[in-house]
Amino acid sequence: MAPHTPRVFRVKWAIALMSLLALAGCRKKRDIPAGTDAAAAPTAILPDQPIEKFLAARARGDNLEVAAVARDRSVILTTLNKDLKPIARDVLAREVEATEGTEIALVGDGLVVVVAKVSGTPGAFLLRRNAAPLAMTRDRCTTRDGVAWVLREPGSARVRLVRASGEASTPPIPIAAEGELHVTCGPDAVVLSVRDGEHLLVSSIGVDQLGAPPALVEVEKEHELDDELRDRVILPRKGNGVVILRLGEASVSVRELDGGGPGAWRKVLRGTSPLALREDADLVEAAAAPEPGGRIYFLISEPTSGGCAEDPPRRIVLHDLEPKGDAVLSTSRPVIELPCGIEAIAAHLQADATHATMWWTEPVDTKTCAQPGMSASAIVTASSDKPGAKRAAILAEGVARADETRFVAVVRAGGCAPYNAPGNGALVLAPQPK
C-alpha cells in the first residue's frame, strides 16, 4: 500500500517569503513607524565580512555563539561578548551558495548544519572545525549536542549520530522495503519511525545506547482507530519517552510510549465530547512537556471571518492538552489572526513542565521600507499560560533567538538601505518584546 498522504500539512515559511506574501494582506497588517531600527542596541559587524540573513544563535553564559552565512560565501562560527564584540571566529566552509531555501542551525559545540549548495553540490551538510563538510540526508534532527540522521540500506536502516564528543551509529535495523523512514530527536533519544500508510512502528534509541537499539514497536496499524488519519506527530519526552499525537478526521488521539511499551490510545476531549478539528485546519507545530504524562501542545491554522477578496483570513489557535487519568482534556485559544493571503506562521514552539512558549516574526508593511529583503517587521512572543502576545518592531533581514530574552538580527545601515550600502550585514540585539 502506498504511504498515506495527510490531508493537512505542516507549513514552514522562509522569513523572506513572509514579506512577499504580505503584499496580498487585506487586514490586521501591522505597520512599523518609518525609521524604526535597532540603532540604540549593541551592534557588531563581524570581522572581514558582513553577513547574510541566514543565521543561528545560542547563549553561552553571558556570551553569544552565532553561526551565519557571510557575504563572501563562507559559513562562520563566532563567539561574541554581551556587547556583541567578537571573541573568537572560525570559518567552517567556503563556496557556499545561499538561496531562499537555505537553512542554518547550531547543533552542538562547534557543530553547524547548513542546507545550501556547498562547492557546487546542493544538500544538507554538517560543518565542523578543521574538517571537510559532511553530507547528510535531509531527514535529520537535533538532539543533545549533536545531530542525527537515518541511512537506508537494502532491507535495513541505520541511525547515525554526530556529537561534539564523537560519533556513533546503530547496527542495521531490519525494516520493510516499502517503509517510509523518519527520525525525531529529543534531548536524550533519537526516535526512528517506519511508516506505511497508517501503519507505524517506532524505536526510541538513547543517544548513549546506539549500539543496542530497542526493537521497533508497533504503535498504530491500519484501521485500528475509528477515523481516517489526517496527520500524526512524534514528540519525544525525557529519557526514551515518546508521545504520538494523531489528528484524525473526527477526533484527536494521544498515545504514550515508555520503557514498558505503548499505552492505550486516548481520545482528546473538549468538555465531554471528542475534540474535532475543522476539515480546513492545518497543523503548524507541536510540542510535549519533557516529563512523562505531561502536557501536550499544538498550533493549528484555521479560517476565520474577514473582508478578504478571495480566501478568508486565517488565525493561529493554540491547543493545550492536559492528561488526567484515562482522559486527555483540551483547552484552546486564538494566538494571532493573520492577514489575508497568509496561511500560517513559522512558529517555534517549546514546552516545559507547566507551559509552552512560542515565537515568530510578522511580515513588514512594504510602505515602511522599499528595499527588497527587509522581511521582519516584528518579533512576537506568546505563552500558553498568558493571554495575548508581546511584540518588538525591527526592520531586519533575518532573526534568531539566542535564549528566552535575547534575539539577534541582521540589519542594514539605518534600518532600511539598499543591500550593497556600506555598513550592511551587521548584527544587533533586537529590542525585547513588550
Image (cartoon, rainbow, N blue to C red):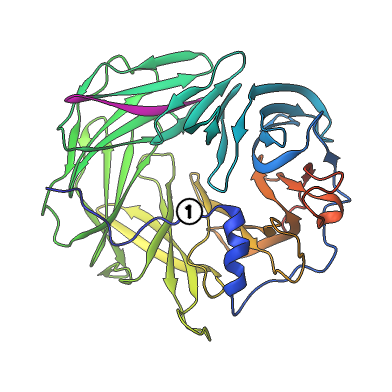
Instruction: From the image, give the main secondary structure of the stretch colored magenta.
Output: strand
Q: Which residue is at 10% across, 54% downward?
A: 223
In this picture, is 111 found above or below 370? above
* The magenta stretch spans residue 343: no
Q: Quadrant of residue 16?
A: bottom right
Q: Is residue 380 visible?
A: yes
| 197 or 135: nearer the viewer | 135
Q: Secondary structure at mark 1?
A: loop
Q: Which residue is at 83% across, 61% downward?
A: 36
Provide residue 219's location: percent of width, then percent of height: 19, 42
Furthest-front residue in this view:
120
Q: Which residue is at 52% across, 55% downward?
A: 13
| 300 or 294: nearer the viewer | 300
State the residue position of label 1.
Answer: 12
* The magenta stretch spans residue 154: yes
The segment highlighted magenta reads 146-156
Which part of the image, by quadrant, shows the C terminus? bottom right
Provide residue 39's location: percent of width, then percent of height: 87, 51
In this picture, is 171 found above or below 397? above
Provide residue 348's location: percent of width, then percent of height: 53, 50
Provide residue 250's location: percent of width, then percent of height: 23, 67
Badge 1 density bin: few <14, some 14–19, many ≥20, Cα 10 Å: few
Amino acid carrying mark 1 in the image: Lys
| 408 or 273: nearer the viewer | 408
